[in-house]
Amino acid sequence: MKRKLLLSILAVVPAVFMPLAATSQIAPDRPAHTEQAEPSYKYEVFAGYGYTSLNQVNQSRNGLQGVNVSVTRDWGKHFGVTADGGYYAYSYGGTNPGSPAVDMLLLGPVLRANIFKNVDGFFRVLLGGEHTAGENATPSISFAGGIGGGMDYTLSRRFTLRASGDDIASSFAANTNPNVCSAGSNCSPHERRNSRAAFGLVYKF
């Protein structure tokens, strides 16, 4: 009788400790490894050197240089809306008749995609207004717009180098003599297309 009782006790002891041993062998849960997420910025500001040709000015032989700035609101990595402004008042490569200056404000969508590693490309459509000063241009402000694009080279998370170009159309009749328009001749605005280029720095925030 005592022998059977002893055997029963010995059989119960392993049964009690086996679940504890199995539990101790299960590794505790570890937090999943997560890579540092790439920061996402909603806005970017561009500022840099700008150039535009000057086909709306009669007898002009040189373009104008100045400054180009823009602000873009991004929705994700591939789409945004940009407001673009330019002021060009300094002749490039020579002189022009009178003292022409061009300023413009344009707005439109921009699409972008990665080309290779740190290089992104973008395409945009811009619409707005353009003003030509110093040449008695008619009208004072013309509807303007066109298509363009460019490339961005990423320097850091917040800074990017940008080179861009556009073909901007407007409608002007340039007259150095205001009496010509009052006489009713040669005052009809015609479409003028000007190539535009810019190079500068982008800041994202």
Image (cartoon, rainbow, N blue to C red):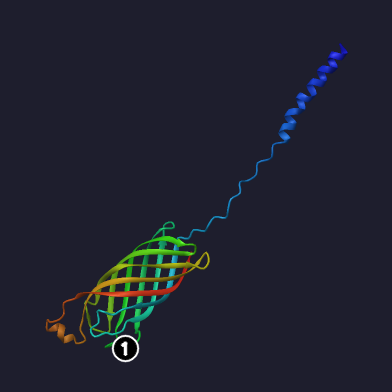
Q: Is residue 168 left or right of residue 164?
A: left
Q: Is residue 30 left or right of residue 47?
A: right
Position of the N terminus, as image quadrant, is top right
In terms of image quadrants, where is residue 194?
bottom left
Looking at this view, is 131 or 14 the one in front? 14
Alpha-carbon neighbours of circle 1 within 10 Å: few (<14), some, or many (≥20)?
some
Residue furthest to the top in view is 1
Q: Position of residue 197 (x, y in %)?
A: 36, 74
Residue at image x 39%, y 69%? 70
Q: Amino acid at mark 1?
A: Thr
Q: Is residue 27 left or right of residue 190?
A: right
Q: Secondary structure at mark 1?
A: loop
Q: Position of residue 64 (x, y in %)?
A: 33, 81
Q: Is residue 5 left or right of residue 79?
A: right
Looking at this view, is 61 or 75 the one in front? 61
Residue furthest to the right in view is 2
Residue at image x 65%, y 44%? 30
Q: Which residue is mark 1?
A: 95
Label tally: 1
Up the image or down, 174 lies above or below 202; here it is below
Q: Position of residue 6 (x, y in %)?
A: 85, 17
Residue at image x 33%, y 71%? 166
